[in-house]
């Protein structure tokens, strides 16, 4: 059966490329893996692929595109057809348009976000290797997350984008936030791996980025991140806390362009046969209002 393996990469638009690279390498702790045109490519130390984050110089900040990795070229063709059957127009992105990437299928989500599917990307390996590896690399800078974990986006039509991920890409919904009487869906959390969510959406009038999240091991690492952010005078959005949704431990903060980042730890494991957890928006009013901030 065809599989969407995971969230593979996020491309963020940044205002000052050099300042952004300094932030993502020295404060977040990612590794720069290449430059191509107006873009810089980065990966976390525990990721195998060439990159999971692309920073592209722009006049505005925000999300440029997200991409999910599939298992094979056959799967790429399968999902291309599924996306088209759902009603989204697809275009092929040629190999070599971006650094270290093969061909991709591009389409626009019902929320207006640009999304791609791909399978081919150069393999660099992790910082600790695959033979007798250490638990973490010595001398790594900054927060040093293991990986890009998930993305949260804002958009208007959450019911349709949820149907898209479930029907076209075989995702499942782990959690949802509904208004009184379940008249409206104002939060939708979706997974294809066994994480609490790989992508999520909250209700908002525009197709925007809410945050890009990087996975760290524990609450201790979240507090370490808070210390580092204070030392580097990085602006906070939310100080260390625990989510009800996902049960994750978290801190929110901003990159030099104003793109929101998250250091995220723990959270529960999801399973294909789990029921969807439902939250009443009124019960989450204070917390959920934070998630609506753009």
Image (cartoon, rainbow, N blue to C red):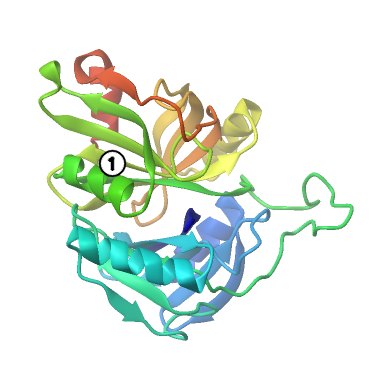
The quadrant of the rendering that contains the C terminus is: top left
| Residue at the image position 46 percent from the left and 30 percent from the top | 273
Mark yes or no: residue 55 visible: no
Q: Is residue 181 visible?
A: yes
- Within the image, what quadrant is residue 281 found in? top left
Q: Position of residue 10 (x, y in %)?
A: 42, 60
In this rendering, would 264 be left or right of 200? right
Q: Quick check: 8 above or below 231?
A: below
Count of marks overlaid on the render: 1
**Residue carrying label 1:** 201
Circle 1 SS class: strand
Label 1 crowd bin: few (<14), some (14–19), many (20+), radius 10 Å: many
Residue at x-position 38% and y-position 45%? 171
- Note whether 15 is above or below 212 in the view shown: below
Q: Residue furthest top?
A: 283
Of residue 174 and residue 250, the one placed in the foreground of this image is 174
Q: Is residue 182 above or below residue 224?
A: above
Furthest residue toward right:
132
Q: Position of residue 71 (x, y in %)?
A: 53, 63
Q: Residue at x 40, y 74 (%)?
A: 104
x and y percent of residue 33 in the render? 61, 72
Q: Position of residue 163 (x, y in %)?
A: 24, 45
Decide if residue 147 is on the left or right side of residue 282. right
């Amino acid at each position: 059966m065809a599989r969407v393996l995971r969230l593979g990469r996020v491309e963020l638009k940044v205002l000052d490329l050099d300042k952004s690279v300094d932030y993502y390498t020295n404060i977040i702790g990612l590794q720069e893996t290449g430059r191509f045109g107006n873009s810089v490519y980065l990966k976390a130390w525990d990721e195998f692929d060439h990159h999971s984050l692309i920073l592209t110089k722009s006049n505005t900040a925000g999300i440029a595109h997200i991409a999910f990795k599939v298992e094979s070229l056959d799967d790429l063709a399968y999902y291309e057809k599924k996306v088209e059957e759902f009603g989204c127009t697809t275009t092929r992105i040629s190999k070599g348009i971006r650094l270290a990437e093969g061909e991709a299928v591009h389409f626009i989500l019902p929320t207006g976000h640009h999304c791609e599917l791909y399978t081919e990307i150069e393999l660099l390996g992790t910082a600790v290797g695959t033979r007798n590896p250490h638990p973490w690399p010595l001398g790594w800078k900054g927060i040093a997350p293991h990986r890009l974990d998930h993305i949260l986006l804002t958009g208007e039509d959450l019911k349709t984008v949820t149907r898209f991920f479930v029907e076209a890409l075989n995702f499942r919904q782990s959690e949802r936030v509904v208004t009184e009487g379940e008249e409206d869906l104002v939060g939708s959390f979706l997974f294809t791996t066994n994480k609490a969510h790989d992508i999520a959406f909250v209700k908002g009038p525009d197709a925007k980025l809410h945050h890009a999240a990087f996975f760290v091991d524990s609450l201790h690492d979240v507090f370490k991140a808070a210390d580092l952010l204070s030392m580097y005078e990085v602006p906070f959005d939310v100080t260390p806390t625990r989510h009800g949704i996902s049960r994750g431990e978290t801190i929110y903060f901003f990159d030099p362009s104003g793109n929101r980042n998250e250091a995220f730890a723990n959270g529960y494991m999801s399973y294909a046969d789990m029921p969807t957890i439902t939250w009443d928006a009124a019960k989450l009013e204070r917390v959920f209002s934070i998630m609506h901030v753009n």
